[in-house]
Image (cartoon, grey):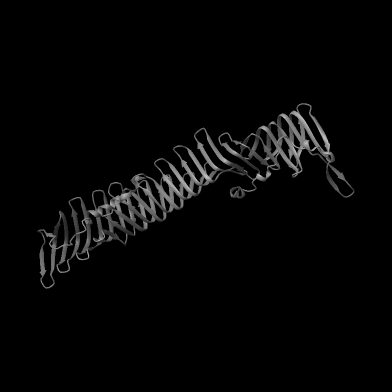
Amino acid sequence: MRKYFKILKSALLLSAFFLSGNLLAQNNILELLPGSERLEYDQKTGTHRLYGNVNFSYQNNVMFCDSAYYFQRTNEVRAYGNVHINKRDTLNLYCDSLYYNGKTRLAKLWGHVRVRDNEYKLTCDSLDYDARSGQASYRTGGLIQSIESGEKLSSRIGYFHPESKNFFFSKDVKYQSTEMQMTTDTLRYLYSKQTAYFYGPTNIYTDSTTLYCEAGSYNTRSQEGELRKNAKIYRSSEFISGDTLLYYPKNQEYIGKGNVYMMDSLNDMSYSGNYAYSSDSLKYRWLTGRAVITKYLEKDTLYLHADTLSNTWSDSTDIMKAYRNAYIFSNAVQGRSDSLEYNRMDSLLYLKGDPILWSNKGEMKGRLIEIVLNDTLLNQATIFDSASVIMPVEKDIYYNQIYGNKLVAYFDTNYIHRADVFGNAITIAFPEEEEKTDSLTTIKRIGMNRLYSSDIRVDLDSAGIIGVAYLQLPDGVFYPIKSLNQEEQFIPGFNDRSALKPNSIEELLDQ
C-alpha cells in the first residue's frame, strides 16, 4: 500500500514557492523585466501600476500577470489576470489574482488556483499562505492529482507546512487510485515519519479488502497500518474487528488487540479473544484472553474455549488446538481437558489430559477421549485407559456406571444410546420395577447389579442403562437395595465431576 499514499508526498510541491519565507518581504527584491505595456507611478500614494504582459523576476523565479500593483509604503503587491509563477522551469503556479503583504507576510491567491510540477498538480478556488508560520491552506475545497498515475486526493480544507513537511486534510477527504479508494473526515501526514494519520470515520477500499476505523495510521515506508476505535477489516469471506487492528498487507498479517472477533464465512467458523494474530502467508492464527473458536454446524453450534487457541491450515489439513483449561460446549455435549485438538478435515476432536465429556446425563472420563463429529455434531466418542461413564440415578447416592480399558460410545441426535466396552468391563446398574395399586403406579428401586465381563455392549436411553449384552458369560452379583455393599457400589476411581460442567457459553467465559 506504500504507493497508495505517494500522493501525500506531492503536497511538498507547495514548498517550492513558499519555503524561503521571504517572498516580497523586503524592498527592492523584485526585478521588473521588460515587456510591460504601460507603467504608472502615483508619487502621492507610492503606488506602482503595471499593465499588459507584466513580468517580474525573483531569485530565478518568474511571475507573469496582466496587471500588477505595488504599494511601496505598505509593502503590498496585487496581481490580476492570468497570474503565473514559474520556479526554475520545474514548478508552476497559476491563479486569477494574487495578494501579498510584505509586513504581515500573508499571501492570498484567488480563482482557479493551480500548482503543478512534472508529476502532480493542486487545484483549488483559493489558497492562503502565512510566511511567518510557513503554512499554506485552502478552505473551500482542493484537489491533488498525479499527472502520471491518476491518483487523486480531495478535501474541503487543506493545510500545508512546507518547512516541517506536515500536511492536514479535513472535511470530506477522499483518495482514489487504480488500486484503492479512501474516505475519511481528517487526514494528517507527517513526512518525517512517513506516516498518515486518520481521524474520524475512515473507509479504505481495495479490490480484495475493505478497512474501517475511527482513528488510525499508516506508514508509507514500512507499509504497517494501525486501525483504532471500532476497527474492522472485510475480505471476501472473512471479517475482522477489534479495539485495535494492526495491518501488515505486505506479509498478509493481522494483529488484534481488545475484543477481537474474526468470522470465516467460508468455513462457518468464528474466532474471538482479547488478543489475536493471523497470518495468511503462514496459514496460522493464534488467540488468547477469553479465547473462543465457534464452529457453526447444521443442527448445533460448537464452541472451543481455552486460555490460548491456535489454528493452522493447508490444502490437506486444518487443525485447531487449545491449551490450558480447554473446553468444548454445545447444547447437547460439553467437555473439558488440559488441552484439546480438532482436525476439521477428518472431523476428529481429541481431549487430552484429565478429559471429561458430558452428554445428556452421562459423564465420560479416561486418559484420552477421541470424538468423531459431523453435521449433527456428535457421532462417536472413544475413551482410552480407565474409561468410564457415570449417570446419576439419585445424585450423590446412586449412579449407573460403566467401566473398562477402552470404551466406544455411539450417539443418536447428540445423545448416547450405546456403549461398547473392551477389557475388564464393569457395569453397575440400579434396576427398578413398577408397583401398582388400585389408583396409583409407582417406580421402586429394587437393588444394584454389579457385573463383570471381558467385553460388553450397553444400551442406554435418557433414563440410563436399559440393556447389557455380554460377549462372554458375565460374573456378577445382585445386592438388594437394603443390603448394598458400599465397597461394591462404585467403579474404580469413581469421581463425580459434574460441578465442572458449564451450563452456558456465558457461564463458561465468566469462569
- Work out which residue is located at the far bottom of the displayed protein and give it: 44
Q: Is residue 364 left or right of residue 344?
A: right
Residue drawn where x is 79% and y is 34% of the image: 450
Q: Nearer the viewer, residue 426 or 194?
A: 426
Q: Nearer the viewer, residue 16 or 401?
A: 401
Tally of numbered discs: 0
Q: Nearer the viewer, residue 368 or 94?
A: 368
The x, y position of residue 120, in whole percent, is: 27, 50
- Work out which residue is located at the far top of the displayed protein and give it: 472
Q: Using the image, determine if residue 72 lies above or below residue 315.
A: below
* Residue 413, visible in the rendered structure: no
Residue drawn where x is 43% and y is 44% of the image: 208
The x, y position of residue 9, in whole percent, is: 30, 50
Q: Is residue 190 left or right of residue 298?
A: left
Residue drawn where x is 19% and y is 56% of the image: 85
* Residue 393, visible in the rendered structure: yes
The x, y position of residue 295, in whole percent, is: 57, 42
- Work out which residue is located at the far right of the displayed protein and give it: 438
The x, y position of residue 213, in whole percent, is: 43, 53
Residue drawn where x is 65% and y is 48% of the image: 503
The quadrant of the image that shows the N terminus is top left
Q: Using the image, determine if residue 232 lies above or below residue 49.
A: above
Q: Quadrant of residue 78?
A: bottom left
